[in-house]
Image (tube, rainbow, N blue to C red):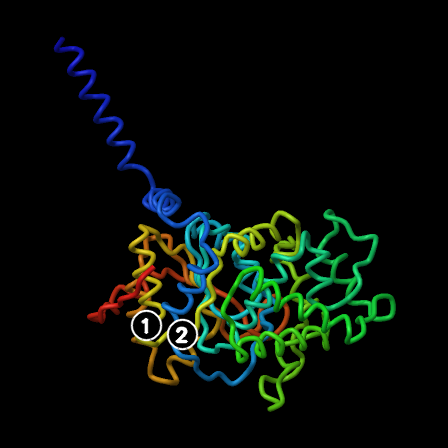
Amino acid sequence: MRTHRLFAAGLVFVLALGLFAQPPAAALVARAADTLPSRLSDADWWKLIEELSEPGGFFRSDNLLSNELWFQWIIPDLLQRAPQGSVYMGVGPEQNFTYIAALKPKMVFITDVRRGNLHTHLMYKAIFEMSADRADFMSRLFTKKRPEHLTTKSSATELINAYWDQAKNPTLPEAAYKENLQAIKDHLTKKRGLPLGKEDLDGVEYVYYNFYWYGPGITYNSSQSNGRGGGNMATYGDLMIATDGANNSRSFLASEELYKVLKDLHEKNLFVPLVGNFGGSKALRAVGKYLKDKGATVAAFYLSNVEQYLSQDGLWYTFCANVASLPLDARSTFIRSSQGGGGGGGGLVNSLGSMQNETSNCKLPLQAVSFRH
């Protein structure tokens, strides 16, 4: 009997040791998978957007497209540092899609000071959900006829070249654009039942028209009337056929598997675009409270070069405290952009940082954040 007790005690000790030896990030990912929703209803998704968002603010550009040609170079390191299957946070438009496809998060929150970014992601949401595969997605995004030779095995370069060649695949007439636009609006307001007012619908139309007008040649500057941002910007096509430092294609359009990560998140209403200032008093803290209530952890937070503007506006420390209020662990990773050459050319380059270490001294008293979900 004593031998049995010793064996049982030893077994309990070994099991306990195994539990405690489990990497903290893995334990948190498992907890997130158990407590984050597997999908949200349309009503709950829109309610979450409204309750977590702040009033829209100003930025100097529309930012319909990113301008970070070397953004894939840090993905191999990112996959070593940040866990998959947790929560992804970010800012801005489509560059997030490639990071999301790599990390395969359970849930996504994109927070941007401009309500126009919400309009961009509403457009993308409809197109992802309406498009069976990458070729359909490209056809709808740019209002071009789908080439017959494209298949689910086509590479990103083959996709882009098929839609980029204006001589062989011209932009369809404006009537086709208007038909596609109406289908997008109907998908959002009728199929999804989103209570979008005229301002938001006009915003979606503004974004979609620019993609129709400029096609795969659209750049960060295409929609700008003030001439800011400089020239020689990467096009949509350039960004999609870019590779990492080892010449591996990691764009969300590189394969159907990567595309499906985004499509699934949108169809399940787990891609949540918010309006808010990183240095504001509500949005990031509200996201943090929501995630803590669900027992989830932030795996990665893509910042672009927003910290530059937060510092100029005297809001960087508030932003730092906001991040410190998020549920983090040792693997939670910043993805940021900064000026400087890289990869054989100029422009913004990307780097990684520890969210936990970099914000450990920024924990200010936080105001109570209340919302229902």
Residue 68 position in % (x across, y down): 58, 70
| Residue located farthest toward the right when viewing the structure as drawn | 167
Viewport quadrant of the C terminus:
bottom left
Vertical relation: 310 (above or below) 189: below
Work out whether residue 211 or residue 6 is closer to the camera in this orientation and state it: 211
Q: What's the CA distance linking mark 2 and mark 1? A: 8 Å
Disc marking residue 282: 1
Work out whether residue 285 or residue 27 is closer to the camera in this orientation and state it: 285
Taking the spot 37% from the left edge, 52% from the top edge, the residue there is 331
Type of amino acid at the residue the image marks with label 1: Lys
Which of the 4 quarters of the picture holds residue 138? bottom right
Taking the spot 79% from the left edge, 71% from the top edge, the residue there is 171
Viewport quadrant of the N terminus:
top left
Mark 1: which secondary structure? loop
Work out whether residue 50 or residue 82 is closer to the camera in this orientation and state it: 50
Taking the spot 67% from the left edge, 70% from the top edge, the residue there is 182
Q: In the drawing, does residue 293 fall left or right of residue 227?
A: left
Work out whether residue 358 or residue 31 is closer to the camera in this orientation and state it: 31
Q: In the drawing, does residue 9 fall left or right of residue 343?
A: left
Disc marking residue 276: 2
Residue 193 position in % (x across, y down): 52, 63
Q: Earlier in the sequence, mark 2 or mark 1?
A: 2
Type of amino acid at the residue the image marks with label 2: Gly
Mark 2: which secondary structure? loop
Q: Are marks 2 and 1 in contact (CB under 8 Å)?
A: yes
| Residue located farthest toward the top when viewing the structure as drawn | 1
**How busy is the neighbourhood of tag 2: few (under 14 within 10 Å), some, or many (20 plus)?**
many
Residue 265 position in % (x across, y down): 52, 53
